[in-house]
Structures are given as structure tokens and as C-alpha cells.
């Protein structure tokens, strides 16, 4: 499994997990975050490896579709880059620093 895809799926999962079914959440979390194999997940849930594979592939498409429509992850990346740029260029501006801290805390809420 390639690291870029794993990182992307984990990030998308963080943003959109609440929109998934319990089974989709379990499979994706075990596969990507906990690095379980298809066989291990299948054994855990008493289903075939093919069923797990199909569910994971469908869920990946669902996560990508959510991102394509809602842009939560890509917008978060852009905001983070802007915040970093402002903090670097204006390190002594306490007003900006405070506002960025507030915005960052909003972004990091569960």
C-alpha cells in the first residue's frame, strides 16, 4: 500500500467519518489507520476477504466523492498554508497571532 494513498485516506476519514456507516468506518480505520490486512479484517467480522475489499474500495470512492463536493480537506490544507505564511511573515503582530490561534482552534475542533 502506498504511503501517499494511506495518508490521504486517513485525512479524508478524519473529515468525513461521521458520514460513513459503522461498518465502513470500522473497515477503513482498521485497514488504513491500524494497518490490518484484508484477511485480518475478514476474520474479525466473519466475512470474506473479497467482501472487505469491495467495501473498502466503495468507501474510498465515497470519501473521494465527499471531498470533491465539500472540499473540507483541501480547504483545510490551504488555510493551514495561509496561517503558516502569516505567522512566519508577521511573528510580532499579536493581533494576527491571536486571530490565527482562534481560527486554528476552530479547525481542530472535533
Image (cartoon, helix red, strand yellow):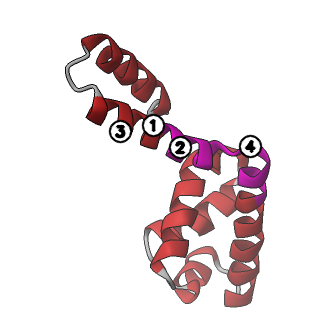
Mark 4 — residue? 70
Is residue 107 inside the magenta stretch? no
Crowd around label 2: few <14 · some 14–19 · many ≥20 (10 Å): few
Q: Residue at the far left: name it.
A: 92
Q: Position of residue 43 (x, y in %)?
A: 57, 83
Magenta segment boundaries in residue numbering: 65-79
CA distance for labels 3 and 4: 23 Å
Q: Do the residues labelled 2 and 4 touch (CB within 8 Å)?
A: no
Q: Do the residues labelled 3 and 2 touch (CB within 8 Å)?
A: no
**Residue ID at (22%, 26%):** 91
Tag 2, which secondary structure? Answer: helix
Sequence order check, earlier mark of 4 and 1 = 4
Q: Do the residues labelled 3 and 4 touch (CB within 8 Å)?
A: no
Q: In this view, does 30 lie above or below 80?
A: below
Horizontally, residue 4 falls left or right of residue 42, namely left
Image-quadrant location for residue 100: top left
Amino acid at each position: 500500500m502506498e504511503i501517499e494513498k494511506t495518508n490521504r485516506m486517513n485525512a479524508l476519514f478524519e473529515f468525513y467519518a461521521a458520514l460513513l456507516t459503522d461498518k465502513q468506518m470500522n473497515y477503513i480505520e482498521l485497514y488504513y489507520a491500524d494497518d490490518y490486512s484484508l484477511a485480518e479484517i475478514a476474520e474479525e467480522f466473519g466475512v470474506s476477504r473479497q467482501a472487505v475489499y469491495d467495501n473498502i474500495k466503495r468507501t474510498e470512492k465515497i470519501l473521494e466523492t465527499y471531498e470533491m463536493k465539500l472540499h473540507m480537506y483541501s480547504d483545510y490544507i490551504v488555510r493551514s498554508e495561509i496561517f503558516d505564511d502569516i505567522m512566519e511573515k508577521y511573528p510580532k503582530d499579536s493581533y494576527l497571532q491571536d486571530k490565527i490561534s482562534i481560527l486554528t482552534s476552530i479547525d481542530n475542533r472535533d
